[in-house]
Image (spheres, rainbow, N blue to C red):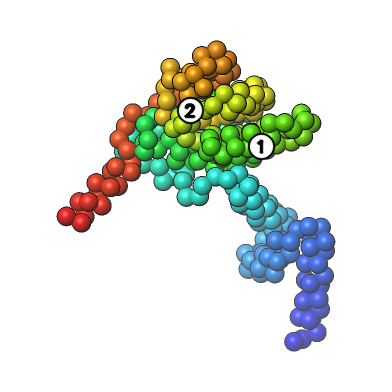
Amino acid sequence: MSAPVARARVDLDATAERLERLGLSYAAGRLAEHLAEASSQDLPAHRFLDRLLDAELAEREQRRISTSLRLSGLPTGQTLGNFDFAFQPAIERSRIETLATCAWIRSHETLLIQGPPGVGKTHLAVALGVKAVENGFSVLFLRLEELIAALKRDADLPASRLRRRKYLNVALLIIDEMGFEPLDRQAASLFFRLVSYRYGRGSILITTNKGIKDWPELLAGDEVLATAILDRLLHHSHVINIKGRSYRLRDLEQAISLRS
C-alpha cells in the first residue's frame, strides 16, 4: 500500500470514528461506499454529505419502525398492500386509504370495524396499525380477552401507576375480536373506565362481530353502561360495516376444490 493510500485510509478511519462518536453508526459504516460513489460521479461536497445523512436518517427510520412494530404486538404480514379489496367490493378502498393517512388518530377519534367472522376485520385493523406506526404513532394491539385480563390485573392499582400502562397512553389502542364472549360486570366496568380515560386523549380501533344494538347484551346486559360506553366511542368516530364473504371459507373451498 502506497503512503498516500495508507494516509487516506487512516483519515477515513478517523472520520468514521468521529461519526460513530456522534451516534451516526450507519453513516460511519457506509462512509467508504459513499465516498467512492461521490468520487465516481464527481459530486460536490454538499451533495455527498446530503446523501450520507439521508442514508443515516433512512436507516434510523427503518429501525424505529421495526422496533415499534415489535413492541406493538401487531401480527406480522397483514398490510393494506396484501388486502384483497376485490374479494370485498363493499369496502370503499378510498375510505380505507383516507383512514391510512392517520388524520383520525391525530384527532383522537374512534374506528369500529364490524362484520361477521372471516371477512377481513382483523387484517384491516392490523394494516391500519402498521400505517399508524409508519406515521410515527405508538400502537398497541390486544385481543379483547388479553385486554380484559390486563384490566383485571391492574384493577386495584393507584391512579399514578395505572396511567403508565401502555393500553392507556398509546396513541392507538387496537382491540380485536370484541363480541365473541359477553363481559361480566367487573370486566364491563373496567372497560368503561378504559374508554372514559382514553376519550379525547387517544384513539381506539375495535373489531367486532356485533352490531351497536347488541352491545348491551355484550356488556353484562347493562344498557345504561353500554349507552355510556357507546356515547364516548361514537362521539367522534368512523364505522365500517363489512358484509361480504368469509376469506377463510373461500380458502377452504379452494383447498377442497384442489383435492377433488
> Which quadrant of the figure has residue 231?
top right
Is label 1 in a helix, a strand or a loop?
Answer: helix
Number of numbered callouts drawn: 2
Residue 58 place in picture, x, y as percent:
64, 52
Q: Which mark is residue 188?
A: none
- Spatial CA distance of label 1 from label 2 is 19 Å
Residue 211 placement, left or right of 226: left
Q: Is residue 50 above or below residue 15?
A: above
Residue kind at label 1, given as amino acid type: Arg
Residue 195 placement, left or right of 234: right
Residue 82 place in picture, x, y as percent:
41, 46
Res. 193 in view: yes
Q: Mark 2 highlights which residue?
A: 182
Residue 1 place in picture, x, y as percent:
75, 87
Residue drawn 64% across the image and 66% down it: 37
Residue 142 place in picture, x, y as percent:
56, 39
Viewer-side residue, 243 vs 148? 148
Q: Mark 1 highlights which residue?
A: 153
Q: Residues within 10 Å of mark 1 (few under 14, many from 20)?
A: few
Q: Residues within 10 Å of mark 2 (few under 14, many from 20)?
A: some
Is label 2 in a helix, a strand or a loop?
Answer: loop
Res. 35 in view: no
Viewer-side residue, 37 vs 172? 172
> Which quadrant of the figure has residue 201?
top right
Residue drawn 36% across the image and 41% down it: 84
Q: Is residue 30 above or below residue 105?
A: below
Residue drawn 52% across the image and 16% down it: 222
Residue kind at label 2, given as amino acid type: Pro
Q: Earlier in the sequence, mark 1 or mark 2?
A: 1
Residue drawn 51% across the image and 47% down it: 75
Quadrant in the picture for the C terminus: bottom left
